[in-house]
Amino acid sequence: MEQGEGGEGVNPTILIFLKAPQLGRVKTRLAAEIGDAAALDAYRRLVARQMAALPTGWSVEVQFTPAAAEAEMRRWLGEAPGRQFVAQREGDLGAKLAFAVEGAFIRGAARVLLIGGDCAELGGREFTAAARGLESHEVVLGPSKDGGYYLLGLRREHPEVFEGIAWSTGAVAEQTRQRLRTRAIAWQELNELRDVDTLADWHLVENRV
């Protein structure tokens, strides 16, 4: 059994959901305040920080969109042992997440952690806590200050946690909790962190990325 950092058990596979760094197609809420070029620069910096903060030796699937951007994503992020590039499926975010989780388990993941690239506070402490949490819980939830979540960990497929969610709203985390309660799925929560969506968010972290 592969040992996780800082605790017993297997290392989860990290699924990081990213868009190709294309002008006008990333951080659109931030771009409305600072312009497309500045938002693209912020996005690139946030993703670079997040990639650098991934635990050494853990398997990583870069879940990218659009599907035609694989070569661009490989040039941008580079190759690394244990790193795969997987195109996201079409559909809403719930469908994308469920499809990615299913595929990761088919490809041999023991557990999965779903993250994005825009939480400048997400690092080794949270990854280790999530891995430990999955030793005793079906799900680990990392809530963000905007009402969404910056991390979701799963021991096995639970497609129901992605169904009927009002994505891109402040209700995402609570609706996810409701799905878990309804199905009596035990979960553990991590500390609340901040995603970067607005100029105010960016000002709080821009000197750290």
Image (spheres, helix red, strand yellow):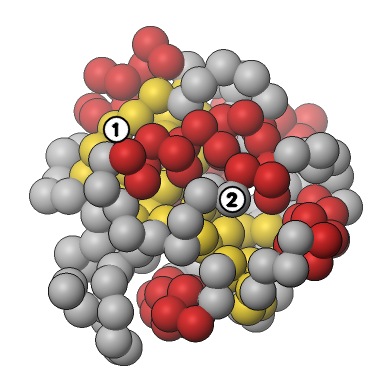
Question: Helix, strand, or loop for circle 2?
Answer: loop
Picture coordinates of residue 98, whole percent (x, y): 56, 38
Residue shown at 75%/60% (left/top)? 183
Measuring from the top left, give residue 156's x and y in whole percent.
47, 56
Foreground of the two, 17 or 95? 95
Image quadrant in which the N terminus is located: bottom left
Answer with left or right where residue 18 lies relative to residue 8.
Answer: right
Give the residue drawn at x 29%, y 69%.
11
Which SS class for mark 1?
Answer: strand
| 45 up-or-down from 112: above or below | above
Residue 173, picture quadrant: bottom right
State the image coordinates of residue 143 (x, y, percent, origin top left): 70, 66
Closer to the camera, 110 or 43?
Answer: 110
Residue 187 x, y percent position in the rendering = 64, 73
Residue 110 lies in quadrant: bottom left
Question: How much space separates mark 1 and mark 2, taking CA atoms?
Answer: 23 Å
Q: Is 78 placed above or below 190 here?
A: above
Q: Which amino acid type corresponds to the residue marked 1 in the rendered image?
A: Phe
Task: Provide the residue designation for mark 2.
Answer: 158
Mark 1, residue position: 85
Q: Residue visible at 38% across and 36% down?
A: 103
**In the rendered structure, which disc, 1 or 2, sits on the residue that comes first in sequence?**
1
Q: Look at label 2 and name its amino acid.
A: His
Point 55% across, 69% down: residue: 138
